[in-house]
Amino acid sequence: MNDLREEEIKLDMGTIEAVMSLPPAPVFLLAVGKEDPNITTIGMFNVFSVDPTVVGVGIKASRHSYKLLEETGDFTLNVPSKDMVEAVARCGFISGSRMNKFSEVGLTPEPGKRVRSPSVAECLLNMEVKITEVQDRGGWDHIWIIGNVVHTDIVKDFDRSNALIYWDGEFRTPSPVLKHL
């Protein structure tokens, strides 16, 4: 056993590369705004509390959606299916400041039930979130928008393996389950 350990080599890695090497994370379409809603692709997400359900997303202050988040005070997080990969990629690359991304990428805004922002009708799961906190640490590249989940909708035959995840520039789907607990 010691012989194998001696042969194992670990390389130094930069911190950004290390973070990008972490296992995949969920990808969301964040929808925000009432009058002229926008959608953006979000890969920086965290669950801060389960009960009450508190989630957060990281977004750059330079994004059009950030301005709308400040104005609206709420947003929806929408879990896209693998069939939506092209729309998800486009939502992350084009700015909603000059166009209506819903119509541009062929998605349908659906009125929120407990928030002013719309959800994305085509998505598998929709979470409505009311913002409770904004964490701007100054030197960080993203600002954390944190809020309470106040309503969720899910498709009747939800299958997690159909949801998109993101890993270092690649959209993927979850792999088969290895073990149930």
Image (spheres, grey):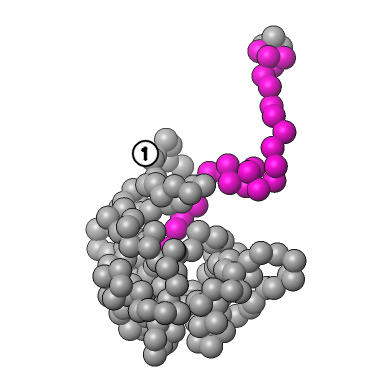
Q: Is residue 76 visible?
A: no
| Label 1 crowd bin: few (<14), some (14–19), many (20+), radius 10 Å | few
Q: Is residue 78 above or below residue 114?
A: above
Q: Is residue 123 left or right of residue 179?
A: left
- Residue in the foreground of this view, choosing between 112 and 39: 39
Q: Is residue 135 visible?
A: yes
For this orientation, the residue located farthest to the top is 3
Question: Which corner quadrant of the image does residue 105 belong to?
Answer: bottom left
Q: Quick check: is 102 in the magenta stretch?
A: no
Question: Which corner quadrant of the image does residue 78 belong to?
Answer: bottom left
Quadrant of the snapshot with the N terminus = top right
Residue 52 lies, in percent from the top left, at 55, 71
- Residue in the foreground of this view, choosing between 96 and 114: 96
Q: Which residue is mark 1?
A: 176
- Residue in the foreground of this view, choosing between 127 and 107: 107
- Residue in the foreground of this view, choosing between 77 and 51: 77
* Residue drawn at x 38%, y 40% as measured from the top left: 175
For this orientation, the residue located farthest to the bottom is 35
Give the magenta range: 4-32
* Residue drawn at x 30%, y 72% as measured from the top left: 104
Q: Is residue 14 left or right of residue 45?
A: right
Q: Is residue 87 above or below residue 163?
A: below
Q: How many marks?
A: 1
* Residue drawn at x 64%, y 70% as measured from the top left: 143
Residue 26 lies, in percent from the top left, at 46, 55
Identity, as a three-letter code, of the amino acid under mark 1: Pro
Residue 93 lies, in percent from the top left, at 44, 63
Q: Quick check: is 5 in the magenta stretch?
A: yes
For this orientation, the residue located farthest to the front is 98
